[in-house]
Image (spheres, rainbow, N blue to C red):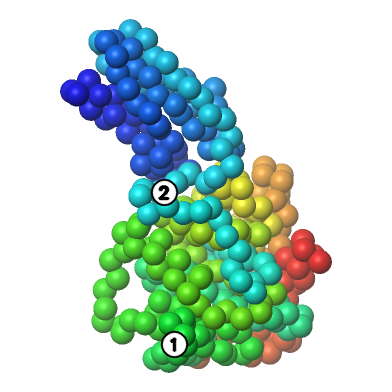
Amino acid sequence: MAKLQDVFNKLKEVRIEEVEKDIVTLGLVRDLAVEGNTVSFSLKIPAGEDAIELEKRVKEKVKELDWVEKTDIKIEKHSVEAPKLGKEAEKAKGPQKIEGVKRILVVASGKGGVGKSTVAANLAIAISLKGKKVGLFDGDVYGPSIPKMFGIEGMVPRVKDNKMVPVERYGIKLLSIGLMLDDSTPVIWRGPLVHKAYQQFFFDTIWGDLDYLVVDFPPGTGDAQISAAQLIKIDGAVIVTTPQDVALLDVRRATNMFVKMQVPVLGVVENMSYFKCPKCGEVTRIFGKGGGEKLGKEMGLPLLGEIPIDPDVVQQGDLGMPAVAMSGDHPVAKEFIKVAERVLSAFE
Ligand SMILES: Nc1ncnc2c1ncn2[C@@H]1O[C@H](COP(=O)(O)OP(=O)(O)OP(=O)(O)O)[C@@H](O)[C@H]1O
Ligand SMILES: [Mg+2]
């Protein structure tokens, strides 16, 4: 028993960096057994992961136990499932379609505060201006900001036949955990809880017929993103970044995670790209230039748009009326409409 526990502990030290979890937690190790000084188990290789490299890392880790003479690892290559997350996910049936919803888009970033929610809100409205039926789900259970951005704070979604009915604003069907909590409620979410909450928001909600459901993710590459990919079939991810060089690292991380989960990455929106002086029209690239181009070259990702820094964006956020809802002529709104066109062109 002690030997088995030792092997188990060693395996827990092998991590898949993109999802910040170890291979045991991800459920990649099965049928672990120790017979004499031989360790055997099967190892599932998540899609996108280098099987040889992972096997080598696992072997080396197990061999650190000096009593181990032989390792017998059965490799199960390129699982079609995303890495699993604990017991809750074990039960999952794999990504499902949401009834009535044609396509699901997610807005994500490796880093916080880069403008995901701003992009998600404006993208949703811009897509609806193209004549599509659109829903927006605030998947940021840790820091929901969609209610404020749409001026729907305090509105409680109706319940019909035990299902939630989204709130509507600017033609968009909206749902956020923020509508279920009062401001003072601290939200402490562990992975399995996020999974459960997502399950309800996706499947126990009357979304109705939608052409696109946009999901605003919390920052990073954690439980929320993994849970979503396990529950729903995501048709495309839009990555948001700011132009600094360091942000590129975060984009790479987020992109790798989606590739691993077999979610198509549609491209990158560079937010806070530049500042255009309202008086003289001069453009200043405050955070440097060419970040988007670099991305394109390095990762083969299209640049979906460059959104300027504009004090109006902050004001619109506070007013509860995103740029595109306020006026399609605003320079920021125009750029978001371009982003929406590029996103739609991936599907239509
Ligand atoms: N282009 C822009 N110009 C000026 N301010 C902006 C711009 N984009 C976003 N902001 C402001 O930056 C702040 C962060 O934006 P937002 O909430 O969209 O980021 P986020 O990535 O969703 O953050 P979090 O990681 O906390 O969810 C907000 O106050 C928003 O109004
Ligand atoms: Mg946000």
Q: Is mark 2 within 8 Å of ligand 1?
A: no
Q: Where in the figure is residue 35, as x and y percent of width and height?
A: 29, 14
Residue 89 lies left or right of residue 344; in this view the side is: left
Q: Secondary structure at mark 2?
A: helix
Q: Is residue 112 visible?
A: no
| Quadrant of res 274 | bottom right
User: In what quadrant of the picture does the N terminus appear?
Assistant: top left
Eyeballing the image, is 95 above or below 54?
below
Q: Is mark 1 within 8 Å of ligand 2?
A: no
Residue at x-position 62% and y-position 90%: 170
Residue 60 lies left or right of residue 8; in this view the side is: right
First along the sequence among labels 2 and 1:
2
Is 272 in front, or is 149? 149
Q: Where in the figure is residue 209, as x and y percent of width and height?
A: 66, 79
Q: Secondary structure at mark 1?
A: strand
Is 130 in front, or is 156? 156
Q: Where in the figure is residue 97, as x and y percent of width and height?
A: 61, 64
Specify the amino acid type for callout 1.
Val
Eyeballing the image, is 345 above or below 181?
above
Q: Is residue 130 visible?
A: yes
Density class for disc 1 (Cα within 10 Å; few <14, some 14-19, many ≥20) is few
Residue at x-position 77% and y-position 61%: 346
Residue on which the image places disc 2: 90
